[in-house]
């Protein structure tokens, strides 16, 4: 996995980690049982666990969001790098022109004072143009970064909304009192993990 993928998935992962620490109020019309009654009946407590890493790996929306973010990031970096290389080449040419001018001045190589002043004015104008281009590059870097962050925020919100909508629909009757991300658990307990069920349902909904 490359560095960009790790960055993108870490961003989405952080968003989903926060999402899954959800508390649900039990449906007031549903039959309630105490913990002692549940344990006595040999049933599971009204708690579920979801593995967010698995959701990121297998939920089609999350995968597509990650791929889209990565592609946009790479495209932005190529665009910025191309302009930066062009600027660097132009700047190096300018530096060489300045060096040549200084050598000519020292060697009295100009035919007239006017010719030397004209060349000096040209170099000064070129320097101002390069400073403007350097600022344009910085502005472009900031714009690309802002655009990337905006797209990232939009896709992350879409992912959060989709998962949260399913979980609320799934638990509309209040049969689950608590849904946790397994990242907050020290030990996994068999029978409480509903990750596969959630992924299957999410992908089925997304496919439609």
Image: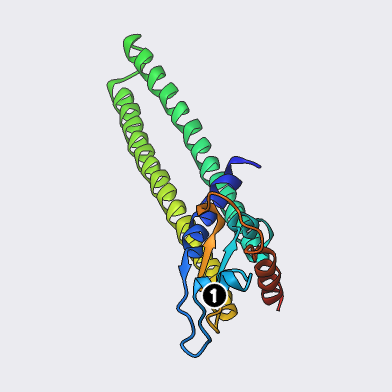
Q: Residue 82 lies in what quarter of the image?
A: top right
Q: Residue furthest bottom?
A: 29
> Residue 109: image x %, image y %?
37, 13
Q: Residue at 65%, 69% (x, y): give it.
A: 198
162 lies above or below 71: below
Residue sitting at the far top: 107
Q: Is residue 162 above or below residue 64?
A: below
Residue 4 lies, in percent from the top left, at 58, 45
Residue named by callout 1? 37
**Nearer to us in this view, 105 or 188:** 188
Q: Quadrant of the C terminus?
A: bottom right
Rendering coords of residue 94 (x, y %): 42, 28
Q: Residue at x 39, y 40 (%)?
A: 134
39 or 74: which is nearer to us?
A: 39
Give whichever of 155, 178 is nearer the camera. Answer: 178
- Which of the 4 image quadrants contains residue 118? top left
Point out residue 126 in the picture as x, y percentages from the top left corner. 37, 35
């Amino acid at each position: 996995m490359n560095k960009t993928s790790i960055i993108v998935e870490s961003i989405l992962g952080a968003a989903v980690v926060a999402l899954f620490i959800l508390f649900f109020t039990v449906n007031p019309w549903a039959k309630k049982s105490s913990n002692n009654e549940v344990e006595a009946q040999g049933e599971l407590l009204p708690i579920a666990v979801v593995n967010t890493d698995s959701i990121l790996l297998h939920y089609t929306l999350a995968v597509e969001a990650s791929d889209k973010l990565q592609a946009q990031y790479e495209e932005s970096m190529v665009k910025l790098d191309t302009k930066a290389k062009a600027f660097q080449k132009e700047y190096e040419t300018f530096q060489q022109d300045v060096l040549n001018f200084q050598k000519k001045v020292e060697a009295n190589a100009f035919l007239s004072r006017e010719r030397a002043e004209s060349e000096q004015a040209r170099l000064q104008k070129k320097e101002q143009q390069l400073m403007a281009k350097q600022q344009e590059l910085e502005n472009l870097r900031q714009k690309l970064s802002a655009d990337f962050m905006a797209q990232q925020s939009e896709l992350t919100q879409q992912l959060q909304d989709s998962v949260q909508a399913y979980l609320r629909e799934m638990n509309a009757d209040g049969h689950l009192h608590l849904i946790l991300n397994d990242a907050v658990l020290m030990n996994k307990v068999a029978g409480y993990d509903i990750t596969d069920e959630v992924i299957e349902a999410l992908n089925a909904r997304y496919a439609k």
